[in-house]
Image (cartoon, helix red, strand yellow):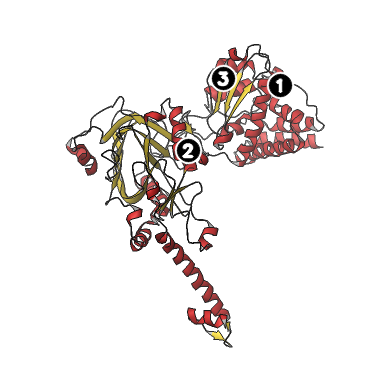
Amino acid sequence: MFYSIIGALLGLPIISGCFLSQDGVKAAAVIIIFFIIVFQIVRPTLAKAEQAQWSGPGKVLLFPCLLSHTRLFPKKHSFSYSYLTVGVPVGFEGNAGGLVSVLGRVGPDLSSLLSFAPRMPRAWFSIDAADYLERGKPELGLRGKLDEYLRTQEADPAAYPYAYLVTAARVLGYHHNPVSFWYLYDADKCLAAMILEVNNTFDERRMYFLTRDDIDEPIDHSPNQQDIEPTQTRRSEQTGSPWAVLKQSWPKDFHVSPFNSRKGSYTLTASDPLYPFMQGRGAISITIKLKSSKGHCKMVARLSSDGAAVDPCDMTPGQKVIFLLSWWWDCFLAFPRVLKEAFSLFYRHRLHMWYRPEPLKDTISRKADKTEQHLEGIFRRYLQHLVEQSATPLKVRYIASGLVQDTTQLMLSSPVQDRPECAPELEFRVLTPVFYKRFIHYLDDLDAFSCELNESRTIWVSHPDLLPTFALNKLSAVVEPTASGGDIYLRIIGNLRVRPERIVRPLTSNSVATKAQTTDNQDSGRSAMDVYVIAHEPPCSRAAYQRCVLKLFLAERMLAGVAPSVSVQRLFRLASLVA
């Protein structure tokens, strides 16, 4: 009887008055899934509006925008697309009208999609604190991470008690967010500073902290420039308040587009979306001009409102459904649109392409892959071993690259310290995870640190003159391993080891790609780190290190275009060792 009722409700054929046919079961499953999806779309419209829980200034708002790019030279190229941004008061946490959520976890997962619970803690457009500023530490929330970042910029968080974040939110867990804008307000709720958080497609990130100090130049109102300045910016200037618009210029030091070098400068003109006194619901109006190293305006990027801002808590259920159907797909098309324009610039306009250079000191690097994560752990313990063996009082602040924030920094100290407070402190910062793969190629630690610091610049050291106090050179790297089987392993690795070539910055399309050197005059043999692993690491870690290093070295030999004579010579030497 139950199956008959279900079948009748779904309009499916009934066999013997009780059970559905095989085709009917398939159709029933499809219809049930359809109703679940429809219910999940409608369910956010039924969520209670929690915006009233926020007592601070500003509201959660949805900003339908238009994103446009105008390239002026060497080839002219323009495009514009729809772009949805979400504005949230920094400090707000919860669900705003069922559409926007600021929570510790992001996006509806499978369990929430299949759940029919009356309350939906996550919304379709979600913002997670872990996605912003320094990676990790979502428990701090947006406000806590903002305060932490301001301290790194030697700014007092108390000077900016209010903040508003305009960003591209996650949609169903997917996130494509080229740039986020943090509007910082003083105690009088006037726009005092901004943070531009820029992400590139290589998973690298650069934050620019821009204040009203040292404002560079007024807006150029020449006839040609007037055509590319946004209407909303000019409208904001007509308010007559110097606090309605923030203008600032700064040097370019972050690789974003492959069609622009890392030289030049940016100029920002941004209006306050909450003017006046964080009570308004104004328009988004942001213009960023890229200037070449010679001062010519090369490109203009503009983000401007394409309609009034929407408060999700003021929308009816029908309006929410219409809004979702109109905008949920926009986030998924952002990256394909970028690829489309890149193909146009490369194939149609034949623009020069710049290969990605390794990041600089103030850039957050990409995430480390599994091999780099494993080598980082070995290098961390090896560096600690070196510092502990140092005969000179020393403190080393080691800052890793490509890891989550809570495991990035480590303070190391040498045990020989009569007066620990007088020991010099050295900051050893790894700028890119590729350093861990490059370090294992060097035989000489001091040579490795020197080359990676001064030539390839994969690390940054606050006091390079202190490196010789703990780094090992060739003479000190000949200590024999104490573990059985270590010698044969070191001989195999030593025959494969070659010194890496320097990384050229910036690497252009006409430059030769970085690869291991293959000539016989390179250092080969055991390194101090090899000996350390054999002598001090536990068997499981030692075996993992051996597999990792052998895999990397063999891959470079077989896949990096090694000269046949060198390859044959090395393989014969390896064969003799195994025999």
Closer to the eye: label 1 or 2: 2
Badge 1: residue crowd in 10 Å (few <14, some 14–19, many ≥20) = some
Q: Position of residue 55 (x, y in %)?
A: 37, 43
Q: Which residue is mark 1?
A: 477
* Residue at position x 42%, y 50% in the image: 335
> Foreground: 169 or 300?
169
Label at residue 204: 2
Horizontal side of 143 relative to 223 (left or right) equals right
Instruction: Say what amino acid the circle numbered 2 marks.
Output: Glu
Circles 2 and 3 in contact, beta carbons < 8 Å: no
* Residue at position x 26%, y 35% in the image: 245
Whichever of labels 3 and 1 marks the residue nearer the N terminus, that label is 3
Q: Which residue is mark 3?
A: 426
Instruction: Say what amino acid the circle numbered 3 marks.
Output: Leu
- Distance, label 2 to label 3, CA atoms, is 25 Å
- Per the image, label 2 sits on a secondary structure element best described as loop
Tell me which corner region of the image, top left, top right, bottom left or bottom right, holds residue 226.
Answer: top left
Q: Position of residue 306 (x, y in %)?
A: 27, 51
Instruction: Say what amino acid the circle numbered 1 marks.
Output: Ala
- Per the image, label 3 sits on a secondary structure element best described as strand
Tell me which corner region of the image, top left, top right, bottom left or bottom right, holds residue 22.
Answer: bottom right
Q: Position of residue 516 (x, y in %)?
A: 60, 32
Badge 2: residue crowd in 10 Å (few <14, some 14–19, many ≥20) = many
> Foreground: 208 or 547?
208
Whichever of labels 2 and 3 marks the residue nearer the N terminus, that label is 2
182 lies above or below 393: below
Label at residue 304: none
329 lies above or below 355: below
Badge 3: residue crowd in 10 Å (few <14, some 14–19, many ≥20) = many
Whichever of labels 1 and 2 marks the residue nearer the N terminus, that label is 2
Circles 1 and 2 in contact, beta carbons < 8 Å: no
Circles 3 and 1 in contact, beta carbons < 8 Å: no
